[in-house]
């Protein structure tokens, strides 16, 4: 583990953090807390204390397909940020409870690049872990920071961890609601916003989705190889 991993707490970049706890399951929340917030498995080098409040949001349930309940959960999380964040330019952070921290990826350069991006007036969303399509693999570095791992995205998937500005929450909510009516997964629906607004993504990401069974895909999945 690097010195930087011991020093930086990504959650503290936001004013408020919302964790979507799927099915209200305590085991998923415990795994999330251990990996992302506390890092208690590495007792010699614990992560810094949290400054940012972290709110747990029970995931939506019902008779709808799992991916649609996921979209509903993100809509509720965005509404909560829109309500709680103090100013239009305040940033909130949304996690799904299967987020997992990638060791060694939170370094000085990436952390400072994200800090700078949060102050840029044109940036709307920063994906802290993403599954970028082939079209995005060759995109140029966002030149405002010079950090090669912070890229403009136009076709990036995965809603496991993303920063979003308060004045943009409404646009993402409307996008998700349209996608929900068309039975689209949320990270397919938001491609329309990526095409028109400035979204950034970290590659390699700070976070990935925990490997395991996917109810959406009905199989065991691992995204570490595409999000690393």
Image: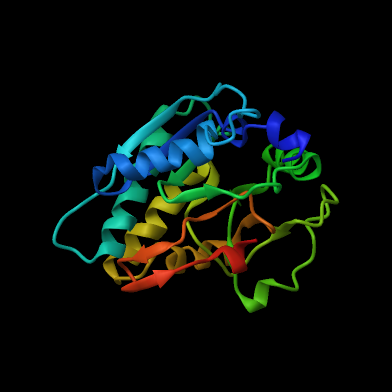
Position above or below: 146 against 219: above
61 sits left or right of 222 in the view: left
The quadrant where residue 111 appears: top right
Q: Taking the image as drawn, is residue 166 in sight? A: no
Q: Position of residue 124 (x, y in %)?
A: 59, 48
Residue placed most toward the observer, 50 or 6: 6
Residue at figure coordinates x 30%, y 49% from the top left: 22
Q: Position of residue 120 (x, y in %)?
A: 72, 41
27 sits left or right of 225 in the view: left
11 sits left or right of 186 in the view: right
Q: Taking the image as drawn, is residue 29 in sight? A: yes
Residue placed most toward the observer, 78 or 21: 21
Quarter of the image with the N terminus in it: top right
The quadrant where residue 163 appears: top right
Q: Position of residue 181 (x, y in %)?
A: 27, 66
Quarter of the image with the C terminus in it: bottom right
Q: Position of residue 204 (x, y in %)?
A: 69, 57
Residue placed most toward the observer, 203 or 219: 219
Residue at figure coordinates x 32%, y 56% from the top left: 70
Residue at figure coordinates x 45%, y 36% from the top left: 33
Colour mapping used in the image = rainbow
The quadrant where residue 116 appears: top right
Which residue is farthest right?
Answer: 146
């Amino acid at each position: 583990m690097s010195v930087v991993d011991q020093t930086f707490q990504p959650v503290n970049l936001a004013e408020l953090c919302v964790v979507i706890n799927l099915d209200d399951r305590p085991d998923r929340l415990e795994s999330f807390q251990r990996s992302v917030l506390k890092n208690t498995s590495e007792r010699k080098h614990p992560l810094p204390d949290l400054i940012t409040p972290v709110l747990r949001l029970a995931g939506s349930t019902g008779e709808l397909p799992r991916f649609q309940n996921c979209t509903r959960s993100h809509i509720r999380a965005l509404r909560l940020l829109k309500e709680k964040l103090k100013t239009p330019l305040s940033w909130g952070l949304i996690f799904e409870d299967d987020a997992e921290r990638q060791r060694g990826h939170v370094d000085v350069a990436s952390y400072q690049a994200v800090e700078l991006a949060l102050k840029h007036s044109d940036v709307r969303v920063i994906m802290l872990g993403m599954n970028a399509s082939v079209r995005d693999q060759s995109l140029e570095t966002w030149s405002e920071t010079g950090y090669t791992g912070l890229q403009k995205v136009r076709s990036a998937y995965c809603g496991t961890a993303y920063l979003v500005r308060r004045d943009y929450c409404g646009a993402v909510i409307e996008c998700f609601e349209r996608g929900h009516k068309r039975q689209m997964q949320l990270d397919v629906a938001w491609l329309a916003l990526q095409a028109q607004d400035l979204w950034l993504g970290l590659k390699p990401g700070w976070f990935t989705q925990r490997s395991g069974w996917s109810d959406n895909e009905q199989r065991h999945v691992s995204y570490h190889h595409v999000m690393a």
